[in-house]
Image: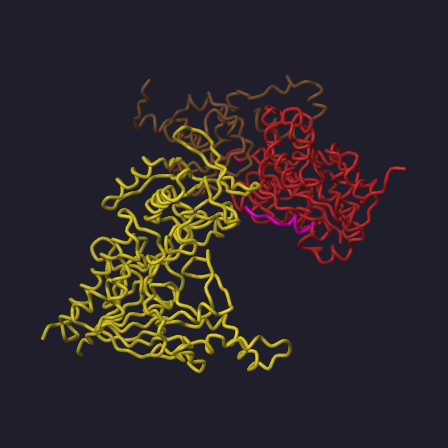
Chain colours: A yellow, B red, C brown
Amino acid sequence: MRVVKKALVIGGGVAGIQAALDIADGGYQVILVEKTPSIGGHMAQYAEVFPTLDCPQCILTPKMVDVGQHPNITLLTYAEVQKVSGEVGNFQVEILQKARKVDHTKCTGCGTCWQKCPEKIPSEYDAGVADRAAIYIPFAQAVPAKAVIDTEHCRYIKYLDFMESGAEGKKPPQCRICERLCPAGAIYWEQEDEIITEQVGAIVVATGFDLMPVERLPEYADDPDVIDGIQFERILCPGGPTAGVVHRPSDGKTPKEVVFVSCAGSRDPEHGVPHCSRVCCMYLAKQAMLFKHAVHDGQTHIFYIDTRTTGKGYEEFLQRTMAEGTVYLRGKVSRIYRDGDKIKVMGVDTLSGKQVEVSADLVVLGMAMLPSIGSQELADRLGITTNEQGFFTENHIKIDPLESTCPGIYLAGAAQGPKDIPDSVAQGSGAASKVLGLFARSEKTPEGLTVS
Amino acid sequence: MDLSYYPGCTLKTKALNFEDSAIAAMAVLGVNLVELPRWNCCGTVYSMADDDLAHHIAPVRNLVRVAEQGSDRVVTLCSFCYNTLKRADLLMRNSQEKRDTINSFMDDEIDYDGQVEVVHLLEVLRDDVGWEAIGRTVKAPLEGLKVVPYYGCTLTRPQGVAIDSVENPTVLQDLMKVLGATALDFPLATECCGSFEIVSDPDAVVERAYAILGMAQRKGADAIVLSCPLCAHNLGQKQAEVADKYSDFTGMPLVYFTQLLALAVGVSPEVCRFDLSFGGVEALLRERGLIPQRV
Amino acid sequence: MRLEISSNRLRNEFVAKVIELSGQDINLCYQCGKCSAGCPMSFVMDLLPNQIIRSVQLGLADDIAKSRTPWLCASCLVCTVRCPKGIDIACVMEAVRQIALRRREDFIDPAGLERDTVAELPAIALVSGFRKLTG
């Protein structure tokens, strides 16, 4: 049987982007499937990245644009892999292209629609610290920069659903503002979900991570000023909803005392996950540094158990954070609660042997990294295995980390285990090289893959 | 409904207000608390040393008494009794070796192997009577009364013994809402009051009491609602000392949940024995018109 | 004086006894300090709870014997329910107390309590205090 020399990459974060670009640059066709309306993944949410303090807009956006324009890449955003069959060299794949209700051959991404849409929903891209409209692109640099309608929240779709259901009562408004204002006539209410069938020879799984929800740690309170690391990235981001001016969510005040809690859910087999999430030490150090750059008289406190800085330039970066005045307090926090205007952080500094308490204005939890939501279902569809925490299992953790337990399906990025950006990019390229190696063969026989 | 009821030492002495109000309120709700005959001390605290089986005999003997009554449940009011009896029961259920040793030590008694479920009265109110039925029975809603719930340690720890969520219990708040009171958020609801350290280090307990009482005051509470006679003592008896040491503290009424339940379902205030409660509960309730002015 | 660490110290009788009485695997502790961070009695303790665990790990029987910490533990179990490794720290404290109590080293003398104090305290306080602090 001939090897189909076309690859499927699942997940449009930095690992999937790198894998897709490398395979495409090698001269082969790639289908990149991303479930949200834009590629970019979590990296696109960050303010600046350690240890160089590059902004993702500067270093990620060019790669995203390359993906969008590459002749060998078919980009399917707002799409999900539904069914996979076949085997290495010849997989049959069904992809659900969710209805965008916008004709992307007409949409110019001008922005009129999302500026005028009256519906406001917490923005996924802004991790809930800002709202978006029901018709939207997730962020300014989105690829594709073309709108989608969130059918769950769109007023007119609600009206249509109401009329179809024949229910009694007050009708939702027949809004249709976007349709009236769209200069390109791109609104396309009749557009339905679509199943796309493809044949590919290899699959790269790069579905990334999500953070453990803060609610999983009830002792760390349910309070608007106790936020997770990605939310703080959005608050710190110069291109973010506050233009990089730091406001705390509850009352918009500029926080002065900011506490960062490492290992929130990580290294905690009893209440969270047993693993180290690998990136929190570094991003919390970076956020502390960025905060101090933004609020000069601010004070930052990082509760840590151990600092893990295993990447190139990382330890130097961490020490710079310390030198710039961030206080490292060694110990896990037991309890966080509101007391008036302040948030009490009850911790310990085991180095001085003191129980400590900080009256903070804002608390950032370095929540544990978990496999992205939906990865178990994807694993079941692909017929590959996951570990106890749900990360995809590699063929051999030491010497075969890129291959999944199924030949022809490769792993890249945080979907395989917590990973920082350089490791995700390296693994994306590594998985691409595996695919290119496979495509260098042309026949699959009962004895294996051969070059004819 | 008849329920076997285990009172424990302090309910018969310094916490008569807890017991009397509970029995009267439950009668209104159709639950007859039947005091266990020949009950003995529960042991007060659960012995945690692995080889210390002798101290489990007291609580297990009480569970045997319940089984002898042909009852499969026993309800407690005191949080300490609940915790000690419940943990002794779990030990007898979970370790065959220890169960056999304890049973053979008490060879004059019937064998105990977990026939009895130990419950706290708050569980009975929530799970058997139900908030809706209690709400229907309320005659005098506690309108305008702002309370903070205080669980202390033994109702919500350890996991497996907790009558509610370990970190975010709501059963007391839920009860207070049904009674018409306002339950305020209280971050120190499950913080320890200092417990038995009152015997050896009363000064430390003053500090604990100030932390908890002061927070309740800052939250704007009229009273703290509790379920443990030791918490009541530590937070109550020490209020004068707290006020001496910390001038911002001006006093905080303490009330058992059963007293407010009884009052709301129409039990006479005399039965609730507010005179035995610390911190001026009686004056507070008079001022709010929840009990009649003194004639 | 410099503390000499050796297999003899790490495996001494005291360590074995604490492990036996508590039934807890002391080696699981990675010293995150969460027990000490949440302890309501830490403010009067000479060693923090995590330092007691560390001292057990290192076999420092004398340091523990001199410490008031195990006697100030109110067995409220907040350490136990929040320990990321599931160690019942309150139970380790109990084991340490038991070792002393079984040598007839009571922490308090019930006969020495003032008559007024005894009259004022509820039975629940006296019984639990005597149970935890005397043998």
Residue B259 visible from this viewpoint: yes
As for residue A68 lying within the magenta part, the answer is: no
Above or below, comparing residue A385 to residue A173 in the picture: above
Quarter occupied by residue A240: bottom left
**In the rendered view of the protein, which quadrant contains the C terminus of chain A?**
bottom left
Coordinates of residue A199 in the picture (x, y in percent): 26, 77
What percent of the width, then of the height, locates residue A262? 39, 43
State which region is magenta: B167-176
Depth check, front residue: C83 or A36: A36
Residue depicted at 65% across the width and 27% down the height: B247
- Prevailing secondary structure class for the magenta stretch in the rendered image: helix
Left or right of residue B167: residue C125:
right
* Above or below A429: residue C105: above
Image side of residue A408 versus residue A171, left or right = left
Residue B149 falls in which quadrant of the image? top right
Examine the structure image and report whether residue B171 is included in the region drawn in magenta: yes
Identify whether B96 is placed above or below B44. Answer: below
